[in-house]
Amino acid sequence: MTESGRRNLFLALCAIALLHTGAHISQSYVNYPTWHLIESESFKPYHWAITIRAGVFLAAPRLLEIVLGLIVLRFPPAAIKRRIILVGIGLAVGALLSTMLLSRPVHRQLDIQSNTPELLARLMATDWVRNVLEWLRAGLYLWALSRLLKFNERVP
């Protein structure tokens, strides 16, 4: 694969990761904090509908990001060390596991019990684990992008 192709793959990986981080920031700081305003009877159908959309706009891109990360790991740009990509993949997998093991069980309870204050508090508390991993990954990829730009300046 050409260096240009490797860079384009890495740029696609960064774009997906950063868009995904933005989606989770919106979920964490816009959506979740306002769920207590929804009437209990209305919350269950709302939550069911939003869960389907979250699968499309959050879970699918996360899986695509991990697969693309593995491809970039195989074909990294010259300016980016493989270990940087490996750490990024690890952070994405960690965020996925956090979602599956911490957030999804709370979401299942929200489907059953509705938006009780206790469940909403637990959801927002467990969300910090994923957010820290998201922010670290976003920072890592932004730093790696800066290396890619600096490397490009040095190469005639």
Image (tube, grey):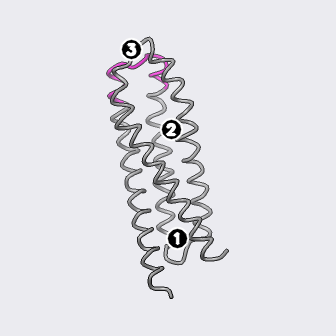
> How far apart are the alpha carbons under marks 1 and 2?
27 Å
Residue that numbered label 3 is attached to: 39
Is 125 situated left or right of 8 in this image? left
Disc 3 marks a residue whose amino acid type is Glu
Q: CA distance from mark 3 to mark 2?
A: 26 Å
Q: How many neighbours does mark 3 have within 10 angstroms: few (below 14), some (14-19), or many (20 or more)?
A: few
How far from the left and from the top, in percent, is residue 49? Answer: 54, 25
Farthest residue, direction right: 1
Circles 1 and 3 in contact, beta carbons < 8 Å: no
User: Does the magenta stretch mainly form a helix, a strand or a loop?
Assistant: helix
Instruction: Identify the mark at residue 33; answer none if there is no mark.
Output: none
Q: Which residues are magenta?
A: 108-122
x and y percent of residue 149 in the render? Answer: 44, 74
Which residue is denoted by mark 1 in the rendering? 82
Q: Which residue is mark 2?
A: 100
Between residue 76 and residue 3, name the one nearer to us: 3
Residue at mark 1 to residue at mark 3: CA–CA distance: 49 Å
Report the quarter where the N terminus lies. Answer: bottom right
Q: Secondary structure at mark 1?
A: helix
What residue sits 44% from the left and 28% below the top?
A: 106
Q: Earlier in the sequence, mark 1 or mark 2?
A: 1
Residue 48, x across and y down, in percent: 53, 23
Q: Residue at x 60, y 61 (%)?
A: 70
The crowding category of the residue bearing disc 2, from other C-alpha atoms within 10 Å (few below 14, some 14 to 19, many at least 20), is few
Q: Is residue 133 above or below residue 83?
A: above
Asked whether 115 falls inside the magenta stretch, the response is: yes
Of residues 51 and 5, the one drawn nearer to the viewer in this rendering: 5
Q: Is the residue 138 above or below the residue 144 in the image?
A: above
**N-terminal-most mark, 1 or 3:** 3
Badge 1, how many Cα within 10 Å: few under 14, some, many 20+?
some
Q: Which of labels 1 and 3 is toward the front?
A: 3
